């Protein structure tokens, strides 16, 4: 507590000290950051520049208006013997303070327009990435490369609920960051799978809503390798604060190696689909998947939340025919919060989690669900 | 029949009947004011829960799911339960007194429009205790989070919104009818007090946009229960359509909240400057201009949904334009003070703070209107700071000013000036400690509606929470001041409580008798 108070005092002090430096580049997000980051792309720089223009215009007007007001409050107070005059109109003054602000606004419209044109300059990208918002994680797909993966929060619940000390990267760490090459123009095509999310990387100046059924485009190009952290900025349910965006910008060669590796992984993965899995293997894998992807709603003990999320334990679907269970995961349940997991989870993971649900917490159907069954169902549609 | 209102001395039954069946504009105004204050305290309690949870990083007190219910209920209760009914209460009390009318034009409807409100809020609040919890999708309730993914209680939420809408529409029709038909002889439109003007314009806004809100929630109801897909992309609908409809209501709504506040301040500043309002007619025109513009700027709340650039540019330019009439108002208030004879009683303090802080919120509004910069501000704490500067330091401060200003007229007792000024300073300082740091948080990258945040935001969040608790305390002081005034305040019978006050409301005795202006007054 005392330490906090001291840190607080220091940051207040630094506020005063750093005011003149407000405009200087602070790429790294720190406690002391008070202003918008300049970021590392043309777009973020444009947003920053127009932001600073507005800050100064408002400051100048504000100092003028409030200065005059404080003067009036001092000079024309009754206690100093001020006697009220009786005027209540002056056409010239009134016209002036209508016309002058209008002119200021018209002048400001020019840089504002230029900046916006930059935001919308999404043509001719070198690389295209589809960003899909899920409750509560992001999926990145490198279009035309056959590479796609999920990126979700890595901070543990124990840290969130104070059972463990919070790490340095608390809520700013993900299982797998988005990796981009430096010096290339990247176009992001942002969409949503369930509800609306919004994909924001402040240092890129990119904030695009992830709306189901719609693509919104943004772009970035930077020469500065590094790690950039962003957030989901559209309320999307209970996990809204827990789906950060982490982007790693690498030099071209490093990026190429990373991409080649990702592609190889994808090929290798394809071969595991045909393999026959044992019940034990599926059970272990399934438990992990369940806790990661299902327990948020259906709860770790399979009991769900009465009236909101149904129980899996003893559910007619988990105890019924296998094909029906697969259908729920692949198709989702329209009109409910149960989304389709077809694109989010691999066939292996879907098979494993189905096996787990049918054989955990006293559900003992006893059958085994293989990845190939899931694939067959998908292909039969 | 000459009879006074039933008091407690006539027995409980008579007393309760008086309030339930009353058609008297003063009684109904009083009901509105007390009801809105109760809602203000409830919404404030929700805010305290939010700020307590955000005091430190990590989840300490509540779960994220409940946090979302708190932010949603806080917004809904403050906008629809506290601010709007408070100004309707002021309108009920003051408009007849200001225009020299004996009562509102439609007194029975007046009773109805008040008495359905408590039911609406009882329904809304009860959802917190339902299985699955209350509304958790934000006060802007974007689909499909509020439809496909909503808790079941959403149907009650929709019903409550319908009732509130009906109440607002009835209240507005009443105000329009009263002002158009019942002005004292000689009071032409351009002689009406500014509070009356701003309320008439507000009433027209309400009549225009409340049905749009009703349409939006009805479409939600259909999507949820009858299988339509207005807002469901999977069925050929469009979630963005929801946002267009909502903000077509929502932007005028923010002016519905602020215009009556402009009116209050335009009454108070001349009084304590002992000088007539500067630029009366330009005030009226500026209000009308703001009201008109408020219909054509709605999509500035949607700069990040991926509108075509032509749309973005249009909404940006139109929004920037609002700064002009808003500026005119601010300049007029300050020039009213210029060469006046100023004193700084509590209502004046709140009004001056209004002008300063509202203008500050106007500046951030102007910044937000710049679409390219809004890509960075949108849905961060910067926006939260902006709208609390305009709505709290705007609407709530001016409402507080109104209470101190007219309280002697309402109850014939004078509040304690020292206590009033102390309350002002606690509120002013608490408010700024709570909301100024939120600008920094937003610029540094903290999104709004976050139940938890990274360590880099810890310090300012703690400052903000402390400020919020102080500001919350100031409201308890306000309640204390009002009750202490009513019970033990120094009696005053002067018609004109304030030396510099002008207007018909200051020609009737204090406290204002139950029936006033049964014969139309002379108005020169
Ligand atoms: C000069 C006048 C104003 C301008 C130019 C302005 C502009 C804006 C803009 C562009 C936004 C959208 C920000 C975003 O979401 O990214 C916004 C949000 C908002 N403004 Fe203003 N504003 C002004 C005055 C007001 C007033 C007078 C009020 C109410 C009393 C108000 C209440 C709000 C509210 C409630 C929001 C946030 C709504 C939400 O998303 O929950 N504004 N304003
Ligand atoms: Cu708006």
Image: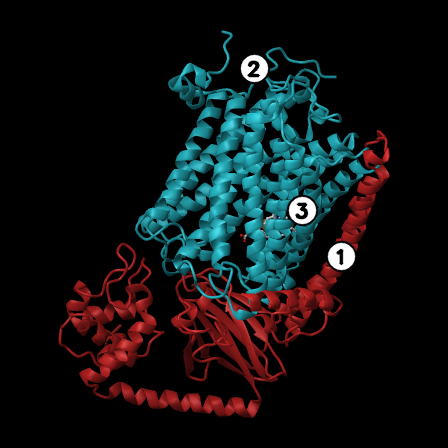
Reading the image, the residue beneath label 1 is A59
Give the residue at x 50% y 10%: B3
Q: Which chain is red?
A: A
Do the residues bearing badges 1 and 3 touch, measured as CB atoms within 8 Å? no
Reading the image, the residue beneath label 3 is B358
**Up/down of B105 relative to A227, above or below:** above
Q: Is residue A189 visible?
A: yes
Picture coordinates of residue B420, whole percent (x, y): 64, 36
Q: Residues within 10 Å of mark 2 (few under 14, many from 20)?
A: some
Q: Is residue B452 left or right of residue B494?
A: left
Q: How far is mark 1 from mark 3, CA to CA?
A: 15 Å
Picture coordinates of residue A16, whole percent (x, y): 72, 64
Q: Secondary structure at mark 2?
A: loop
Q: Is residue B180 visible?
A: no
- Using the image, name the chain to which the residue with label 3 belongs: B
Which picture quadrant has residue A349?
bottom left
Q: Which chain is cyan?
A: B
Give the residue at x 41% y 22%: B16
Q: Secondary structure at mark 1?
A: helix
Do the residues bearing badges 2 and 1 touch, measured as CB atoms within 8 Å? no
């Amino acid at each position: 507590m005392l330490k906090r108070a001291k840190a607080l005092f220091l940051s207040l002090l630094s506020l005063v000290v750093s005011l003149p430096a407000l405009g200087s580049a602070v790429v790294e997000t720190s406690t002391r950051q008070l202003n918008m980051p300049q970021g590392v792309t043309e777009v973020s720089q444009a947003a920053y520049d127009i932001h600073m223009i507005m800050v100064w215009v408002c400051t100048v007007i504000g100092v003028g208006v409030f200065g005059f007001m404080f003067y009036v409050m001092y000079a024309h107070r009754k206690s100093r013997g001020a006697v009220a005059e009786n005027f209540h109109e002056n056409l010239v003054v009134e016209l002036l303070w209508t016309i002058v602000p209008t002119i200021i606004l018209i002048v400001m419209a020019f840089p504002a327009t230029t900046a916006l044109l930059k935001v919308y300059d999404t043509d001719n990208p070198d690389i295209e990435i589809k960003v899909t918002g899920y409750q509560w994680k992001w999926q990145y797909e490198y279009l035309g490369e056959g590479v796609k993966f999920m990126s979700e929060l890595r901070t543990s619940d124990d840290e969130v609920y104070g059972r463990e000390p919070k790490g340095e990267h608390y809520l700013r760490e993900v299982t797998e960051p988005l990796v981009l090459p430096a010096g290339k123009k990247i176009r992001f095509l942002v969409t949503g799978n369930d509800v609306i999310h919004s994909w924001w990387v402040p240092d890129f100046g990119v904030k695009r809503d992830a709306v189901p059924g719609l693509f919104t485009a943004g772009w970035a190009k930077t020469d500065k390798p590094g790690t950039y952290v962003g957030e989901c900025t559209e309320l999307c349910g209970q996990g809204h604060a827990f789906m950060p965006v982490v982007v790693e910008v690498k030099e071209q060669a490093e990026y190429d190696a990373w991409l080649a590796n990702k592609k190889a992984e994808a090929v290798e993965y394809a071969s595991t689909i045909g393999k026959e899995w044992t019940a034990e293997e599926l059970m272990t894998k399934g438990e992990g998947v369940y806790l990661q992807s299902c327990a948020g709603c259906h709860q770790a003990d399979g009991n769900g939340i009465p009236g909101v999320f149904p129980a899996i334990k003893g559910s007619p679907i988990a105890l019924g025919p296998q094909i029906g269970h697969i259908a729920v995961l692949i198709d989702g349940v329209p009109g409910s919060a149960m989304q389709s997991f077809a694109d989010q989870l691999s066939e292996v993971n879907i098979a494993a989690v189905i096996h787990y649900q049918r054989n955990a917490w006293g559900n003992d159907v006893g059958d085994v669900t293989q990845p190939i069954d899931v694939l067959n169902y998908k292909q039969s549609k | 029949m000459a009879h006074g209102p039933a008091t407690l001395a006539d027995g409980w039954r008579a007393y309760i009947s008086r309030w339930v069946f009353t058609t008297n504009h003063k009684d109904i105004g009083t009901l509105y004011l007390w009801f809105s204050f109760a809602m203000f305290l409830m919404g404030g309690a929700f805010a305290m829960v939010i700020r307590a949870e955000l005091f430190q990083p990590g989840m300490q007190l509540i779960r994220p799911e409940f946090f979302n219910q708190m932010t949603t209920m806080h917004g809904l209760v403050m906008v629809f339960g506290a601010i709007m009914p408070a100004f309707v209460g002021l309108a009920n009390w003051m408009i007849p007194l200001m225009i020299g009318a004996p009562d509102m034009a439609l007194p029975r409807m007046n009773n109805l429009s008040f008495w359905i409100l408590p039911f609406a809020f009882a329904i809304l609040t009860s959802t917190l205790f339902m299985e699955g919890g209350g509304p958790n999708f934000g006060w802007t309730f974007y689909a499909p989070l509020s439809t496909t993914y909503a808790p079941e209680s959403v149907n009650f939420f929709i019903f409550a919104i319908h009732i509130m809408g009906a109440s607002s529409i009835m209240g507005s029709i009443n105000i329009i009818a009263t002002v158009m038909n019942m002005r004292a002889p000689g009071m032409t439109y351009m002689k009406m007090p500014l509070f009356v003007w701003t309320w008439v314009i507000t009433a027209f806004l309400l009549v225009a946009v409340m049905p749009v809100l009703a349409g939006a929630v009805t479409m939600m109801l259909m999507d949820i229960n009858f299988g339509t897909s207005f807002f469901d992309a999977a069925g050929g609908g469009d979630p963005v359509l929801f946002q267009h409809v909502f903000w077509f209501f929502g932007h005028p709504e923010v002016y519905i909240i602020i215009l009556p506040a402009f009116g209050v301040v335009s009454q108070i500043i001349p009084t304590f400057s002992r000088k007539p309002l500067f630029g009366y007619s330009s005030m009226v025109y500026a209000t009308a201009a703001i009201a008109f513009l408020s219909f054509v700027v709605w999509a500035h709340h949607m700069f990040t949904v991926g509108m075509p650039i032509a749309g973005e540019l249009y909404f940006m330019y139109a929004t920037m334009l609002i700064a002009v009439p808003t500026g005119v108002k601010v300049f007029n208030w300050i020039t009213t003070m210029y060469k006046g004879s100023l004193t700084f009683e509590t209502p004046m303090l709140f009004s001056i703070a209004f002008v300063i802080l509202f203008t500050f919120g106007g500046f951030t509004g102007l910044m937000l209107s710049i679409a390219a910069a809004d890509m960075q501000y949108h849905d961060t704490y910067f926006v939260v700071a902006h709208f609390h500067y305009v709505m709290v330091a705007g609407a709530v401060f001016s409402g507080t000013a109104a209470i101190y200003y007219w309280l002697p007229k309402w109850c014939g007792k004078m509040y304690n000036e020292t206590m009033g000024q102390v309350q002002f300073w606690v509120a002013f300082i608490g408010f700024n400690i709570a909301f100024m740091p939120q600008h920094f948080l937003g610029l540094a990258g903290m999104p709004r509606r976050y139940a938890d945040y990274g360590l880099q935001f810890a310090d300012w969040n703690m400052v903000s929470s402390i400020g919020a608790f102080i500001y919350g305390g100031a409201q308890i002081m306000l309640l204390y001041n009002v009750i202490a005034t009513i019970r033990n305040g120094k009696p005053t019978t002067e018609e004109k409580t304030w030396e510099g006050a002008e207007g018909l409301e200051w020609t009737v005795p204090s406290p204002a008798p139950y029936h006033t202006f049964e014969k139309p007054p002379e108005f020169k």
